[in-house]
Image (cartoon, rainbow, N blue to C red):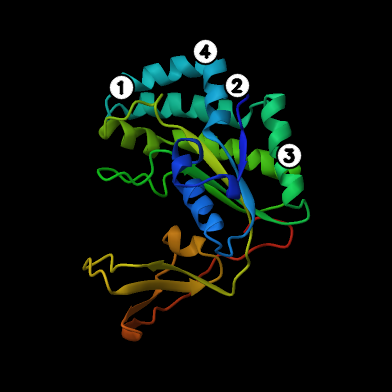
Amino acid sequence: MALNYVLRFEEMDRHSLPMAGGKGANLGELANAGFPVPPGFCITTGAYRRIIDERDELKDWLDHLNELQPDQLDTIRSIGQKVREFFESLEFPAAIKSEIIKAWEESGTEHAYAVRSSATAEDLPHASFAGQQESYLNIKGEEPLLKAVKKCWASLFTDRAIVYRLKNGFDHHSVSLAIVVQRMVFPDVSGILFTADPVTGHRRTVSIDAGFGLGEALVSGIVTADLYKVRDNEIIQKQIAKKEKGVFPLPEGGT
């Protein structure tokens, strides 16, 4: 059976979680429901798993990590660095590379892309992995795209991510990573909308955090966002923050 190393958004839905991770599966749901989702594709966990399965030294490193305690930081740091260096210097298997490049060419090589990690173990009821793996924004060109993909895989093995899995009893072999590649939108302002109040849990209060530039400024916590709470079509709370920073795209790529 041929493996799909790449899936377009319209080829995915909620059942694609094992192959596309949380971000990929949800983008597929939105695209198929007719929402105006910026186009893109997902590099599936099949690509990551193939690399893991073909390299014995990687398996040995993961076995070693599984034997450690969360407080064995020196050993965690040493093995994590080896795994990250492996991924960042990786030569792509030809089949994986050709599928990625084909999907990128179909999406439009002239555009800038966000390259975002989509872990299969994100946001479980008893553990939240959100924000642990990296995202790379405003990526332009074939080589920067492939480099960003490798760095996303590598980010599964930062010291913080390894310790979190050890503390929560996750086998390092069991966690896989998909990668979302999506055409960038360059907003003047961006935000995060919660359909229920994340503080009080009130189901009919919409909570919006917003700031200038790309949403990465909010996600990474470098700014205090404006806050709006809306209930029954009325703003019931408004808190304007002193927004001295923002994340903005650079013409040559990156932020």
Secondary structure under tag 4 reads: helix
Q: Position of residue 153 (x, y in %)?
A: 53, 35
Q: Quadrant of the N terminus?
A: top right
Q: Which residue is mark 4?
A: 56
Q: Nearer the viewer, mark 3 or mark 4?
A: 3
- Asked if labels 1 and 2 touch by Cβ distance under 8 angstroms, the answer is no
- The answer to whether residue 34 is visible is yes
Secondary structure under tag 1 reads: loop
Going 55% across and 29% down the picture, which residue do you hit? Answer: 46
Q: Earlier in the sequence, mark 2 or mark 4?
A: 2
Q: Is residue 162 rendered to the left or right of residue 57? A: left
| Residue 84 drawn above or below residue 195 | above
Q: Nearer the viewer, mark 2 or mark 4?
A: 2
Going 33% across and 30% down the picture, which residue do you hit? Answer: 73
The kind of residue tagged 2 is Met
- Asked if labels 3 and 1 touch by Cβ distance under 8 angstroms, the answer is no
| Residue 76 drawn above or below residue 245 | above
Q: Which residue is mark 3?
A: 101
Q: Nearer the viewer, mark 4 or mark 1?
A: 4
Residue 139 or residue 222, whichever sits in front: 139
Q: Position of residue 95 (x, y in %)?
A: 70, 26
Q: Which residue is mark 1?
A: 68
Residue 228 or residue 7, whichever sits in front: 7
Q: Quadrant of residue 111?
A: bottom right
Q: Position of residue 173 (x, y in %)?
A: 41, 24
| Residue 91 drawn above or below residue 198 | above
Q: Nearer the viewer, mark 1 or mark 3?
A: 3
The kind of residue tagged 1 is Leu
Q: Which residue is mark 2?
A: 1
Q: Earlier in the sequence, mark 3 or mark 2?
A: 2
Q: Earlier in the sequence, mark 1 or mark 3?
A: 1
